[in-house]
Amino acid sequence: MTALPTRKLEAYRYADIDALASVWTSLAAPARVEIAAQQKLQQIWLPSDEEIDIRRVEMTVEAGAVVRIFALNSALRYGRYELDVTMHEGADFTLHGANIGGGESTLEIVTTLRHIAPGATSRQTIRSVLGDKATGSFLGRIEVAREGQQTDAEQSVKAMLLDRGATANAKPELEIFADDVKCAHGATVGELDGNQLFYAATRGLDPVTARALLLEGFIAGLWDEIDGDDQGIAELARDALRMVAA
Amino acid sequence: MLKIENLRATVAGKPILNGVTLTVPTGEIHAIMGPNGSGKSTLAYVLGGRPGYEVTEGSVSFDGQDLFALEPHERAAAGMFLGFQYPVEIPGVSYLQFLREALNSQRRARGENPLTGGEFIRLSKDKAALLGMDPEMLKRPVNVGFSGGEKKRAEMVQLGIMDPRIAILDETDSGLDIDALKAVGHGINAIMRDPKKSVLLITHYQRLLDYVVPDKVHVLSRGKIVRSGGPELARELEREGYAEVAA
């Protein structure tokens, strides 16, 4: 077991180190997942019932394989989803993730995408909804090796802060050694729109229901591409939004 | 139904309404006309309870209860509908979901049973048909990508679904072509011409009043009602202009 990380490490800059320390010795090594060439994988990550919920996955996506991950991060104290993905030629990776929390929770999604071969595509869409004193972060590192020509990488990160004490961090980090690549990233932080809230109120929506509905609109689309049974992720996200809207 | 007495209100510290007194009896449609900046929209927002619009004096009673003691959503549940001059877009939330949750919030507040999904779909299809709107549009996010005319039609579909006792319609006619104007006028008559309901129609032009004939017309100027009369007053305004009549 390696030493407990500190906040000096970039990937742990916004982490809840105390929470991490309490589970560190029992933390399993990152799960290793290999997706064979031309195969497809879909994963739905649902929050555990634990107050501290840490997941680490190292993934190798072989040539032409397709991976879709849908992740809801809403642990009550500390939720950390870590993904380290190595992409081979023509691999296609999508992550749709949400950090939803209130209280003093710390929620983070930390990804490293390694485009080591030509023509791989990655799309990451992250939405954070944060109330009270919650902190929500997305740290997204993209490495494009010299061989990673025609990489197409995209990050869309949006956060909604419901209270003054809430914090959102969005940090793209690009390291590109190839010259023919597309790496797009966009990040916004905002709050609920007063006009929309008033409009909803004039239609009879009480403030909590109105906020929850607008927040649902904010994360709309995250789960739309799920193939088949969504395992309840949309309903769980809705419940989490209702909780932070109250 | 609605009794406004000596209402004064400020927006960002600036006085906009300077003592409006007006009574809209049950079963009547009243029009408020006035030039730009006379306070028409402010009056609508104050009645709706918009944050930032501060009432400094006066009172409004709605069916005998103090309107200002009610939160905006409670005013809706009590039977008030505010139609917007610029209906708001809500990305990611479908009209069907928005209106069903809104109507059911109102019904719960009144101690009524919420409508089931099926009941709500039937109701919304009926009201869309009444306004000549394709019910498929209600599957789209609230007002997103709607033209100006479509937004106003959608406001009237909402009016039909909410079925309020009083409707305050703020420049519902602005931005409408003739066909849409007719459809909206027809909708207001069909939904609100009722001995138990009232309408306060705020408008800049007389043309909507060709389709929705008011019982009374009031002229608002510099935050006060300066003249009241029958439907003929609207035609006089159209002919002579506000400067002449409101002077």
Image (cartoon, coloured by chain):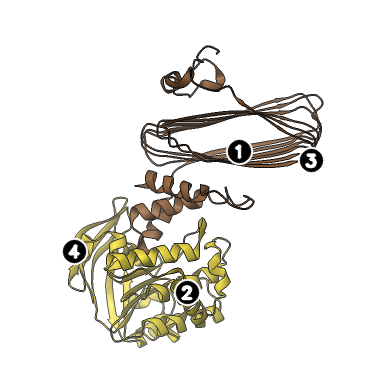
Chain colours: A brown, B yellow
Q: Nearer the viewer, mark 4 or mark 1?
A: 1
Q: Nearer the viewer, mark 2 or mark 4?
A: 2
Distance from disc 2 to disc 4, alpha carbons, whole Å, reads 38 Å
Distance from disc 3 to disc 1, alpha carbons, whole Å, reads 30 Å
Q: Pointer 3: residues within 10 angstroms few (<14), some, or many (20+)?
A: some
Which residue is under mark 3? Answer: A38
| Residue B202, position as x, y percentages in the image | 37, 73
Q: Is residue A171 visible?
A: no
Which residue is under mark 2? Answer: B124
Q: Are marks 2 and 4 in contact (CB under 8 Å)?
A: no
- The kind of residue tagged 2 is Ser
Residues flagged by tags 2 and 4 on a common chain: yes
Which residue is under mark 1? Answer: A186
Label disc, if present, on residue B163 of the rendered structure = none
Residues flagged by tags 1 and 2 on a common chain: no
Distance from disc 4 to disc 1, alpha carbons, whole Å, reads 49 Å
Secondary element at image label 3: loop
